[in-house]
Amino acid sequence: MEHVSNRRLNGLMDLYDMQTQFFKNSIEGISDADTHNRLNTKANHIAWLAGSIVRERYELANQLGIDEQDTAFELFRDNKGIQDNAIYPALEVYKKDWEHISPILKNSLLEADDEQLDKRIDMMPGETISFYEFFSFSIYREANIIGQIALWRRLLDYPGMKYM
């Protein structure tokens, strides 16, 4: 394992590394046509789920002072939910953004000190959390979204997600 400046992040960084690969595995081989298929439900489709997880990594990076934006920023800015008539980018676009920001964010996380981890972030009017709490929640949310995409794979008759 790589050296983590702040030991509070050790376990979270292990999950970060796993999920960096699992996300790519979860979207592997899914057709563009299927990314918007909601199977006549109100569930978030794969295109929204994938964009949402990518947006969150960029938001984490932004909170650490990294001035980068994902391709679909406007579709997801301010935590927008799924938009019924929107056409979301292809999974390859999300994958490219993911592969771009993940090592940049990882490096910043590995170097984060207590001051950065304890920095307060406005989450909603009148409510703040620390960057550490935001990162912890984001790691949980990534696992949740990857699981949803893995379920969509099966519902849309794709092979199960590979973990290796």
Image: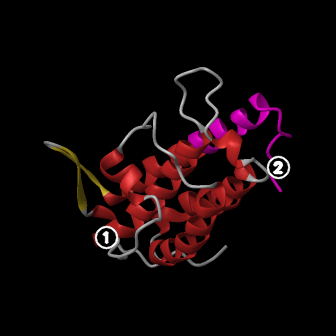
At 69% from the left and 42% from the top, the residue drawn is 33
Q: Secondary structure at mark 1?
A: helix
- Which residue is pictured at 69% across the width and 48% down the height? 32
Classify residue 70 as left or right of residue 156.
Answer: left
Q: Nearer the viewer, residue 57 or 107?
A: 57
Marks 2 and 1, how far apart at CA? 35 Å
Report the label total: 2
Q: Which residue is mark 1?
A: 116
* The C terminus - image quarter: bottom right
**Front-most of residues 37 and 97:** 37
**What residue is drawn where x is 70% and y is 39%?**
34
Asked if the magenta segment contains residue 159, the reply would be yes
- Is 67 situated left or right of 4 in this image? left
Residue 44 percent across, percent down from the top left: 53, 33
Position of residue 146 relative to residue 8, above or below, is above
Comparing labels 2 and 1, the label whose residue is closer to the camera? 2
Task: From the viewer's perspective, tell me whether residue 139 is left or right of residue 162.
Answer: left
Q: Nearer the viewer, residue 7 or 59?
A: 59
Disc 2 packing (10 Å; few <14; some 14–19; many ≥20):
few
Which residues make up the magenta segment?
144-164
Quarter-of-image position of residue 60: bottom left
Residue highlighted by disc 2: 162
Give the residue type at disc 1: Gln
